[in-house]
Image (cartoon, helix red, strand yellow):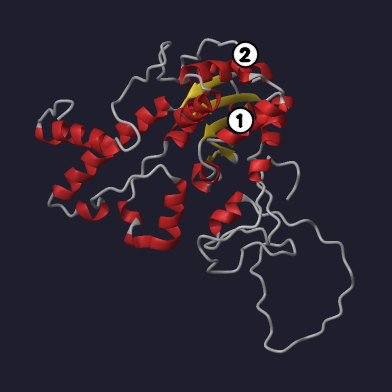
């Protein structure tokens, strides 16, 4: 594995969770063709020696395959590394970072400080590197919850109508912000499950949409110059950001790169920063649901709280009942 990637991104010997069901879509000879099957009888073919280019398997190739990537292939995780992040800063890109509350909580445990202190210290650290703004994905989680409520109410109304639209709006709704599960559903479960999957984006992609389509104008930034990075607790979020579903315009993406919590710790170590001694900067208020006291505000609900939030909203919107909190 190339040394230019973070140590946590280098794949070692892996025992595959799912055995490959087809040949990799990327040939080991550098062309995107299925690997040729071995002939029934041994054959000897003399070919002139030639210099082969290094094989690159992108995250999009990985998503297009129903198998998996192992240490048997040369894997290059393009656009999803610390080097790419630092390169964007060096090139003068308008880098914006969105932090997930899960990553802030993990770093808080690591350094034995509060999540609010982590948020403010990371704001100091990232802006010292040249980052333009540091936001929080809890605000996009609110947007996702609101859209999920509206989606359920619309599907319920259509499913309850007699005009035949219920075939286009099946119930129940399966909601997941986990790209690993979505990928599993697409590749393994197919049409048996996919019609029931919610069409609402995850908080990561929702904040990417807000930044690339709306916030750039408010900040007076050129869309082409924005480099949006999210900090997430899971490597699968890298796969989500690389999906073609989230590419728009002239090959622009809602999220340009995803760094995991561990990679942020690697970056702090790389820069020789004593994180606990960093000053605490004021938060960027444009996109955050965190108060100066560290409290989250907005739509009620959390991990596992989608069902409760949607249930309460649907009870009011569909039947006029208000369910008291705590009941």
Residue at image position (56%, 69%) is 22
Q: Is residue 147 visible?
A: yes
Q: Which residue is mark 2?
A: 277
Residue lying furthest front in this view?
112
271 w.r.t. 67: above or below:
above
Residue at image position (75%, 47%) is 2
Query: In the displayed structure, does residue 305 sit left or right of residue 128?
Result: left
Q: Which residue is mark 1?
A: 264
Q: Residue 9 sits in which quadrant?
A: top right
Name the one closer to the observer, 157 or 203: 203
The percent position of residue 116, horizontal first and vertical second, equals 47, 17
Q: Are marks 2 and 1 in contact (CB under 8 Å)?
A: no
Name the one closer to the observer, 157 or 240: 240
Query: In the displayed structure, does residue 300 sit left or right of residue 224?
Result: left
47 w.r.t. 176: above or below:
below
Mark linked to residue 185: none
The quadrant of the image that shows the C terminus is: top left
- Local secondary structure at mark 1: helix
Q: Residue 186 sits in which quadrant?
A: bottom left
Residue lying furthest left in this view?
320
The percent position of residue 259, horizontal first and vertical second, equals 59, 35
């Amino acid at each position: 594995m190339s040394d230019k990637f973070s140590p946590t991104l280098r794949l070692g010997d892996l025992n595959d969770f799912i055995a490959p069901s087809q040949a990799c879509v990327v040939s080991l000879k550098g062309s995107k063709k299925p690997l040729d099957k071995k002939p029934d009888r041994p054959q000897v073919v003399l070919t002139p020696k030639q210099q082969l280019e290094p094989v690159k398997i992108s995250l999009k190739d990985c998503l297009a395959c129903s198998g998996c990537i192992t240490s048997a292939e040369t894997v290059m995780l393009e656009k999803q590394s610390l080097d790419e992040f630092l390169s964007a800063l060096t090139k003068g890109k308008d880098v914006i970072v969105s932090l997930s509350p899960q990553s802030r909580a993990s770093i808080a445990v690591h350094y034995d400080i509060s999540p609010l202190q982590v948020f403010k210290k990371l704001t100091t650290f990232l802006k010292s590197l040249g980052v333009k703004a540091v936001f929080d994905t809890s605000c996009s989680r609110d947007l996702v919850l609101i859209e999920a409520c509206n989606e359920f109410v619309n599907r319920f109304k259509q499913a309850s109508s007699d005009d035949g639209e219920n075939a286009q709006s099946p119930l129940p709704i399966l909601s997941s912000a986990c790209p690993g599960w979505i990928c599993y559903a697409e590749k393994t479960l197919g049409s048996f499950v996919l019609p029931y999957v919610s069409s609402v984006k995850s908080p990561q992609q929702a904040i990417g949409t807000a930044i690339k389509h709306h916030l750039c104008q408010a900040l007076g930034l050129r869309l082409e110059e924005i480099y949006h990075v999210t900090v997430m607790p899971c490597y699968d979020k890298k796969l989500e950001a690389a999906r073609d579903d989230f590419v728009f315009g002239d090959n622009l993406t809602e999220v340009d790169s995803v760094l995991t919590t561990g990679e942020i710790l690697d970056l702090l170590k790389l820069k020789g920063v004593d994180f606990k001694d960093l000053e605490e900067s004021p938060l960027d208020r444009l996109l955050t649901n965190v108060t100066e006291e560290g409290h989250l505000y907005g739509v009620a609900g959390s991990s596992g709280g989608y069902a409760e939030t949607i249930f309460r909203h649907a009870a009011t919107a569909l039947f006029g009942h208000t369910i008291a909190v705590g009941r």
